[in-house]
Image (cartoon, helix red, strand yellow):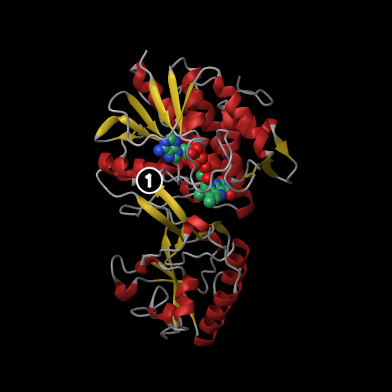
Amino acid sequence: QQRVTVIGGGLAGTECAYQLARRGVPVVLREMKPHKRSPAHKSDTLAELVCSNSLRSDNPESAIGLLHAELRALGSLVLASADLHRVPAGDALAVEREGFSREITTRLQSGVELVGGEVERLPEDGVVVVATGPLTSEALTVDLERHVGTKLYFYDSIAPILSGDSIDLDIAFRQSRYGKGGGDDYLNLPMTKDEYYRFVNEVKAGQKVVPHSFEEPKYFEGCLPIEVMAERGDDTLAYGPMKPVGLKDPRTGTDPYAVVQLRMEDRAGTAWNMVGFQTRLTWGEQKRIFSTCIPGLQNAEFLRMGQIHRNTFIDSPRLLAEDLSLKTERRVFFAGQVTGVEGYVESAACGYLVALAVHARLTGTPFVPPPATTALGSLYRHLTGEAHPPDHPHQPTNVIYGLFPPLSGRMKKADKRAAYSARAKQDLAAWLPLAGVVAQTEGQTSA
Ligand code: FAD
């Protein structure tokens, strides 16, 4: 059978290689460590957790906890290894990082051919999975640009996303600047002069995340963090992303001094992006400052926090085919954070999906994507662009309920998560046989 080359032995590459080998596909996994390391990688083992040792909430009613549950049902290597090396951390799935990585490395040593050294150019032929992550080496980045035909994204500035039903609609009003587009595409949170200056002062004083040495800020002028703008002058934000021009509060008939604009993140309007609010404020400070200083956000639920870091990723919705292979070069697949998913578990999940797609290709069977209603399916929909309005810029995201198709009917917020989770569980069970996966029962680990 044809041999598959997986490049990158991180969270996505190890899961992908392992799942292919389990299905009888000969696999070579090429990892540049220990010969060369990215500025964030330190250890010699595979699947290194470069920062936190937490795989986040394990509560199956949270979107990430649901993804954990789905990966367990699929017999994921990453989840099985995390469960084996779990350390107490409340409802989070935290792991003893060295044991976790060693476990994965050992399991891969039988069944997968491991080859060390940097891959500077994609192999000339054969099926290749690129899983080199957010810190893909420079030489390979250049070569990938040649293959995909565009520059890869480099700095990733992410603005927070809010749950639609947590925004106070007695304060927010729908309107586009000068009535452009449909006239009411945006939700606007109006601010008085006093409210605006209080906000600016809090942003300036708020605690920021210190960049890693390899992440020296090189911001694009059009994409500056709010705290950088606030430092340039107290009115800079009011002339930038918070400019109130072309907007009138319909309830008071007045012109706000400044506004925070929210843009629809999903077609159903369950999730809203804070336009231009990329920031290095710590997550705690974002929650505190935004909910106490921005009218209408006093009860805001943050589906994703703002962040800025170096990140190499491709414009997946435009470049990738249905099976996550390059439209223009179908033997080349992409997996993990380089596709524009964000996070350890999301990257492993993407690696698993790509293993299914490659296996389908090699066996001449159709690739059956996971149902849209599952956590796996929501990530897949993010990569194909289906989870977003047309022309939505591709931005990395963790798994969040904003990527799921909305639930039908009205229900209390507290019941929503349980309903998302129950719907996903049912639909996943129906999909597993179609994907050729034998469901793992609870407590069983993938062998
Ligand atoms: P990686 O896990 O990065 O794996 C890619 C692998 O490819 C690496 O082992 C690398 O050595 C190898 N490689 C790169 N180029 C080449 C090449 N040319 N040839 C051969 N091998 C190559 N996520 C979280 O969930 N929680 C966090 O706290 C967190 N903190 C982060 C902090 C930083 C500084 C960074 C950069 C990322 C952080 N992330 C965090 C994101 C997380 O690291 C990624 O989501 C996840 O590791 C991506 O998995 P991956 O397999 O796609 O890439």
Q: Report which quarter residue 324 is drawn in.
A: top left
Residue furthest to the top: 1
**Left of 376 or right of it: where is 284?**
right
Position of 397 relative to 189 (above/below): above
Q: Residue at x 28, y 27 (%)?
A: 124
Residue 335 seen: no
Foreground residue among 115 and 223:
115
Camera-side residue of 436 and 125: 125
How many other residues sit within 10 Å of disc 1, few (<14), some (14-19) or many (≥20)? Answer: few
Query: What residue is disc 1 on?
Result: 138
Q: Position of residue 311 (x, y in %)?
A: 43, 51
Q: Answer above or below: position of 165 versus 446.
A: below
**Element carrying mark 1:** helix
Residue nearest the observer in this picture, 183 or 321: 321
Amino acid at circle 1: Glu
Q: Which residue is outermost to the front?
A: 35
Q: How many marks?
A: 1
The N terminus - image quarter:
top left
Instruction: Locate the C terminus by quadrant.
Output: top right
- Residue 132 location in percent, x, y? 43, 39
Residue 389: x percent and y percent?
35, 53
Q: Position of residue 152 (x, y in %)?
A: 33, 49
